[in-house]
């Protein structure tokens, strides 16, 4: 069937319309009135989120549309709401930063288009659909990374991102072509059935590895993480904040759907590979973060480390989908809140003190006690210390690893890495509270303040009352349980 | 399974080997006698004027980009036009395929409007 019910695509349609409307408005609005664009974007994204949430129905199984190339299930809906939230927060983060950028209007429509790509990735159920949505996310991300055209570092970031990204998607599409050759279909379920019936061939394993490379690049999994620090450092800070959460979450969505739909037959094999790479990712991220002086680079390595923690959940999902998937989804939400909060504070500090180095946070507690306390809570959450969302998220991830039986040792690796990360996160806290006092933060743009508040309340809320979100995450993960 | 790709491997090996063999043989046999006219860049038999690393007018690429958009649109429209009657009959709602393509074209037109408004269709600015 082409389309059973157009209502299921309300979020996608709304988002497409919104992106096009913002693009056109920017062309004809007078310059002075263009500040309406971010307001429109936030309201529109709110509607997209509501539209997606209204589709939530714990009883409903997956609905396949467009000749089975697109699926609407609770897993996808959960992620669509999540992406709308990512978009809204990033728009709020960007308003102040972009005031003096020449090409002002395109930013918002580009951001909305990349969100559209991510939403499509959440529901993509076909190799071609996955690839197209993946490229939509990637291509727009390259442009966003290079958005400060006058800044050579931003150009460098865009070029590096592009070169790495182009190679990675080339490798991925090669893997997909092999899969098509083996299974004779581009549909994930059909491929899964056909591959499950035959024996494991070297070619099948090669295809899996190639696809894993492409997705691993997107989520910054070691050894495909090399682009990450340079791109994060060079890109405009709000874009960095976006890249560290949005495309990564989309990459995980595809990775999970792909691994569980296409490769049930290769389950033990890919679990071993991903488990080893998760370990490597965690160690690379955390050990290299220790020496960073630039906060954006530090957060880049920290985001690599967090990708490693999330990969634990993916491995566990292979054996115990009922534990692994909700843990990954929960952790994504917690990571969104704490990471965007940290970036909002970085933007606040950078605009007053003119530096993105860690030293900019020195003595923050004297000048701005509230900002410092918030940063401390977010850092505790990133480390994984109660009572924060980061702690609960890690708890679920490690619990999933232990529940899966074979992969209990990943929890141990994760705990060791959390201990390592304590050092560099608390180093910032030490500077804030015991460093040389510095002037207070003069002005607080409304958008940034909102993000800080949302991050603070959300992080503490998830830490104290995790059960409501966890219940939703469990329902979202139900789809793959019992395979 | 893997054996089916055997001919491809053979073809690949022979293709590469033949090319390399031809060049190595020529390199072994030919006398080395370079002189100015021989070393000159060959450009359709004309004498080359100026260095090859000259600057090109960068605006070509914008025009090319817009062209590609509508080139691709045409590729999509031809098969659509060919099966239009069947489509209308099959969906029992004759207008649906028409509306779908209209949406597709409108989105592309927005791209053209964008390029136009930004002044990218002007040859000189």
Image: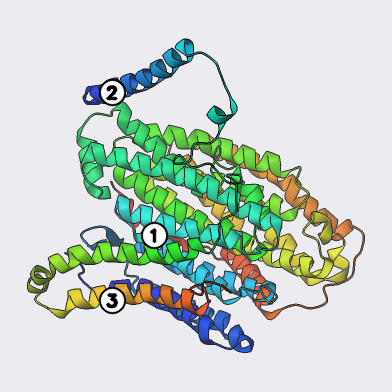
Q: Residue at position x 72%, y 47% from top? A: A422
Q: Residue at position x 35%, y 18% from top? A: B18
Q: Which residue is mark 3?
A: A7
Task: Work out which residue is located at the far right of the displayed protein and give it.
Answer: A436
The CA distance from mark 2 to mark 1 is: 42 Å
Have a look at marks 2 and 1 and say if they share a chain.
no
Q: Nearer the viewer, residue A403 or A7?
A: A7
Label annotation for residue A451? none
Q: Chain of mark 3?
A: A
Q: How is the image coloured?
A: rainbow
Q: Which residue is mark 2?
A: B11
Q: Chain of mark 1?
A: A
Residue B72 falls left or right of residue B93: right
Q: Which residue is mark 1?
A: A122
Q: Is residue B27 above or below residue A145?
A: above
Which label lies toward us, 2 or 3? Answer: 2
Q: Is residue A272 above or below residue A101?
A: above
Q: Is residue B35 above or below residue B122?
A: above
Q: Secondary structure at mark 1?
A: helix
- Specify the quadrant that holds the N terminus of chain A: bottom left
The CA distance from mark 3 to mark 1 is: 17 Å
Residue B34 falls left or right of residue A69: right
Have a look at marks 2 and 3 and say if they share a chain.
no
Task: Name the N-terminal-most of marks 3 and 1.
Answer: 3
Circle 3 residues within 10 Å: few <14, some 14–19, many ≥20: few
Is mark 2 in CB contact (under 8 Å) with mark 1?
A: no
């Amino acid at each position: 069937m082409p389309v059973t019910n157009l209502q299921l695509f309300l979020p996608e349609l709304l988002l497409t319309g919104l992106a096009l409307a913002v693009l056109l408005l920017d062309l004809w609005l007078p310059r002075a009135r263009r500040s309406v664009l971010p307001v429109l974007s936030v309201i529109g994204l709110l509607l997209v989120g509501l539209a997606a949430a209204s589709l939530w129905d714990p009883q409903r199984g997956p609905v396949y549309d467009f000749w089975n190339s697109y699926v609407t299930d609770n897993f996808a809906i959960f992620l669509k709401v999540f992406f709308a939230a990512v978009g809204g927060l990033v728009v709020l983060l960007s308003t102040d930063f972009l005031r003096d950028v020449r090409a002002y209007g395109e930013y918002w429509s580009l951001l909305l288009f990349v969100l559209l790509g991510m939403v499509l990735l959440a529901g993509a159920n076909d190799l071609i659909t996955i690839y197209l949505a993946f490229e939509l996310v990637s291509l727009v991300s390259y442009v966003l990374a290079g958005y400060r055209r006058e800044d050579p570092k931003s150009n460098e970031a865009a070029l590096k991102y592009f070169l790495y990204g182009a190679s990675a998607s080339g490798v991925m599409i090669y893997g997909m072509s092999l899969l098509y050759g083996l299974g004779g279909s581009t549909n994930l379920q059909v491929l899964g059935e056909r591959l499950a019936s035959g024996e494991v061939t070297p070619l099948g394993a090669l295809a899996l590895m190639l696809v894993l490379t492409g997705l691993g690049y997107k989520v910054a999994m070691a050894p495909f993480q090399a682009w990450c620090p340079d791109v994060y450092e060079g890109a405009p800070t709000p874009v960095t904040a976006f890249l560290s959460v949005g495309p990564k979450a989309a990459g995980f969505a595809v990775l999970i759907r792909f691994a569980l739909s296409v490769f049930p037959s290769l389950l033990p094999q890919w679990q071993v590979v991903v488990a080893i790479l998760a370990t490597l990712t965690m160690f690379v991220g955390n050990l290299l973060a220790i020496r960073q002086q630039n906060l954006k680079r530090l957060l880049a390595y920290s985001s690599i480390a967090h990708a490693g923690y999330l990969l634990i959940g993916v491995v566990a999902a292979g054996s115990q989908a009922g534990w692994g998937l909700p843990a990954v989804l929960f952790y994504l939400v917690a990571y969104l809140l704490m990471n965007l909060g940290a970036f909002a504070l970085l933007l606040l500090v950078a605009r007053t003190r003119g530096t993105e180095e860690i030293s900019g946070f020195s003595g923050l507690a004297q000048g701005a006690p509230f900002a410092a306390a918030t940063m401390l809570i977010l850092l505790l959450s990133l480390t994984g210390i109660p009572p924060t969302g980061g702690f609960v998220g890690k708890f679920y991830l490690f619990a999933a690893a232990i529940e899966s039986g074979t992969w209990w040792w990943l929890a141990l690796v994760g705990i060791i890495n959390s201990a390592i990360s304590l050092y560099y996160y608390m180093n910032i806290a030490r500077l804030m509270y015991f460093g040389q006092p510095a002037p207070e933060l003069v002005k607080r743009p409304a958008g940034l303040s909102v993000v800080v508040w949302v991050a603070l309340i959300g992080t503490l809320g998830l830490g104290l009352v995790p059960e409501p979100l966890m219940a939703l995450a469990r329902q979202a993960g139900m789809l793959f349980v019992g395979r | 399974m893997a054996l089916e790709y055997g001919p491809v491997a053979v073809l690949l090996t022979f293709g590469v080997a033949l090319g390399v063999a031809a060049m190595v043989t020529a390199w072994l046999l030919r006398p080395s006698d370079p002189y100015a006219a021989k070393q000159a860049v060959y450009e359709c038999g004309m004498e080359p004027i100026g260095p090859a690393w000259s600057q090109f007018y960068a605006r070509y690429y914008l025009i090319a980009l817009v062209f590609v958009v509508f080139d691709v649109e045409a590729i999509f429209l031809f098969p659509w036009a060919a099966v239009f009657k069947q489509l209308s009959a099959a969906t029992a709602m004759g207008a649906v395929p028409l509306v779908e393509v209209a949406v597709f074209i409108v989105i592309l037109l927005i791209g053209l409007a964008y390029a136009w408004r930004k002044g990218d269709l002007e040859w000189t600015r």
